[in-house]
Amino acid sequence: MAFDDAELRARVEAVLPATLDSLKEHCAIASVSSLPDHADQVDRSAAWVVAQLEALGCPDVRIVSEDGGKPAVIAHFPAPAGQPTVCLYAHHDVQPTGDESLWTSEPFVATERTDAVGETRLFGRGTSDDKGGLAVHLAALRAYEGQPPVGVTLFIEGEEEIGSPSLATIIERHHEALAADVFVIADSGNWQVGVPAFTTTLRGLADCVVEVETLDHALHSGSFGGVVPDALTTLCRLLATLHDDRGRVAVADLGSTDAPDLDYPEDRLRSETGLLDGVDWIGDGSVVSRLWAQPSVSVLAIDAPSVANASNTLQPKARAKVSLRVAPGDDAHRATQALRAHLESHAPFGAHVTVRDGDAGQPGLIPFEGAVAEAATDAFREAWGVDPVQVGQGGSIPMVADFQRQFPRADVLVTAVGDPDSRAHGIDESLHLGDWRKACLAETLLLARLAR
């Protein structure tokens, strides 16, 4: 079916109300992939995706699971003669909610309300990351009544939020089914409300758990404090060596890259992050350089006695989880080795330090040039009414590198539904509904522009 832009705009508007209802329905499924007791919900979420695609008349849709991983959905809408195939990616698993008492509304009841600046948002876990992205794909396919002008493969993953441990195996074993001319990965962030973005650089991820031991048993702090180093104080001193006094990463042999010439006003950053008055920024260089082009190190968690249950005891053992964001162009495995070497070589007081490697995901450099990039720019400009921006992301989307490696001749577009106020992974995650509607139109127009 061939339609002009006005007709496509009308068709998208017609399917948006039902698609928004579908999104709310999907967000009610608590598909938290990291929690074993939510496994049935992840299964239910995959089945829900299948049902949506079957309702569109998809002739080939199935659930796949490899190496004991979480269920993913692969579906095909065959390409009309002579037309390319576009693979639309999203993931249907979500992060845990954290303390539900801190949410303004129930995390698994998607709720519309206005935010602090009067914009309408949909609040709930998964609204922006990434069930909102899946809903964009559904809206585009519904606008075409299940008969898009190009071939469409949907790959809806079920374990992105736990690092996609079986993704490489899925791609290897279903390589032919996933092969496409263009991959559209709807799992990044827009530049700001009202301004869409294509992500062209991604930091990678390397994390570890570091354990410090100083004693073979706990001791009375009054009897031995001042002579014997306790593990918790020692761990704190070790973690403090990860940065210098200006907050720059002090781990040696980590790479960095050039950042785009894009102004990120500090007042906007302070507002978006909620940085408290009087708290200084860390690091050197432009804001976008520090966010997108340089490595960063964060302490994510510490295992130690709680304040409520504390006693006057010198702890013999303590551990922490450390996360390293790897700059584009660097290698995540090499960066993991550098982080390990730093922790092992900076043990205070001769403490015993053990480092256990965790997840590693490669950073990404995503070319944005040629006919596909031009088509995407044109489609998004038409839908949003402004030029899209090319941005980097400080977060990691390791499957981008997987797709690039496995399908080197394909173009990859990394798009978004969320914005800096969406609070993905956080309390009161939300989706700006005005931007979401524009994203639905943009993808619908993109499929039309990719048709030969």
Image (tube, grey):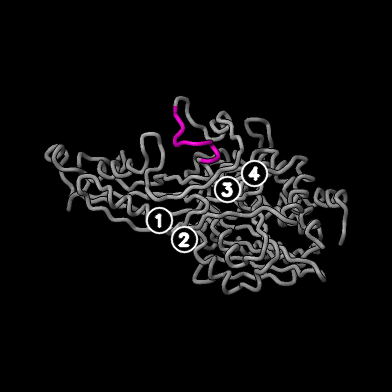
Q: Which residue is mark 1?
A: 336
Q: Which residue is mark 3?
A: 125
Q: What amino acid does circle 3 point to? A: Arg
Residue appearing at x 77%, y 67% in the figure:
57
Quadrant of the image containing the N terminus: bottom right
Circle 3 SS class: loop
Q: What amino acid does circle 2 point to? A: Pro
- The residues bearing labels 3 and 1 have C-alpha atoms spaced at a distance of 31 Å
Please state which of the two labelled residues, at mark 4 or mark 3, is closer to the viewer: 4
Please state which of the two labelled residues, at mark 4 or mark 1, is closer to the viewer: 1
Magenta region: 279-289
Sequence-first disc among 4 and 3: 3
Q: Which mark is residue 36?
A: 2
Q: Which mark is residue 33?
A: none
On screen, residue 87 above or below 126: below
For residue 288: magenta? yes
Please state which of the two labelled residues, at mark 4 or mark 2, is closer to the viewer: 4
Q: Which residue is mark 4?
A: 190
On screen, residue 61 above or below 92: below
